[in-house]
Amino acid sequence: MYAVNVVAILHNFWEQKQTENLLLYESAPSPGPPYVCYVTLPGGSCFGNYKVCDTQAEARRDAARVALMNSLVNELPCRRISHQFITQSLKQAARDSAVNACDSSTSIGTYSLLLNSYIGRTMLEFQEMMTIFQLLHWNGTLKALRERQCSRQSVIAYYSQRGLDEYMRSSMALDWLGREQRSPGMLGVELQAAQRELVLARRRGIELRFNKEKTEILSLALSQAYIHHTPERLNRCATTAPKTAALAGNRTRVNCLEGSYANHYTTNAD
């Protein structure tokens, strides 16, 4: 009986799509078991091992297994966003919250705009944009943009082009650093809550990008809070971005959650 090399199968799956991006494996440092590993797919979706793993290799295989299952399911016709899917989703959302889905100023209205902009694309592709808006809402950025009279349509159009990047993370970390300076101890509480949410989500085998990004941003802010001077590196990053743009840059990893990610493994998927 031959063991299935799930890591190789996942690599081959994305290689066949001829994507130029990478599969990124990240192992959370640990002095001993259980070990934790995350894998980020081309496009940004992130999954982790949900089993209790006694070795790093086992954790990596389990994370790849979860990612592979989600990648395969994502190929099903029912996972493509259609008008019928949008109608059903909005009805369910409106029923749960009693909010008008046609009003773009509401969260469901924004959800409707996002869904319609992704017709014909897959749920994993849509999840990337949803993660961005979850982070913008969590950080208070959407509220600030609304106060500046930026329309939801313009915000969606902007982030559809720019995506989630280094400047966005640094900018949010600065926001949380400012909150920590005004209310000492807040960052520690927020980070602990985010860590718990990430652990629970990982054990459920669901997509982790929002939870993981949140812990990384908070960890970056907390690391800067311990520096006695102003975080000049973050400020330089913030001042170099266009003032009219919300955020811009490239993907960069920072220290986070169940430890910082000391071990990175990238698998070329092109």
Image: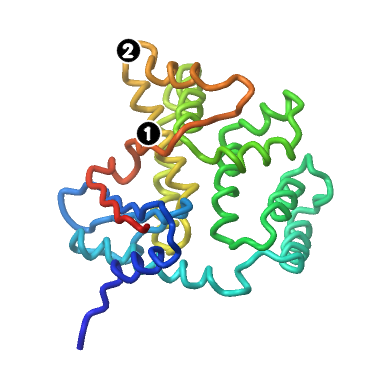
Number of marks: 2
* Figure check: 13 above or below 183: below
Which quadrant of the rendered structure holds the C terminus? bottom left
Residue sitting nearer the eye, 7 or 32: 7
Distance, label 2 to label 1, CA atoms, is: 16 Å
Residue visible at 36% across and 22% down in the picture: 224
List x then y, in percent, for residue 206: 47, 61
Q: Is residue 200 visible?
A: no
Residue sitting nearer the eye, 131 or 265: 265
Q: Amino acid at mark 2?
A: His
Which quadrant of the rendered structure holds the N terminus? bottom left
Residue visible at 22% across and 80% down in the picture: 3
> Furthest residue to the bottom?
1
* Mark 1, residue position: 219
* Mark 2, residue position: 228
List x then y, in percent, for residue 201: 44, 57
Residue sitting nearer the eye, 176 or 68: 68
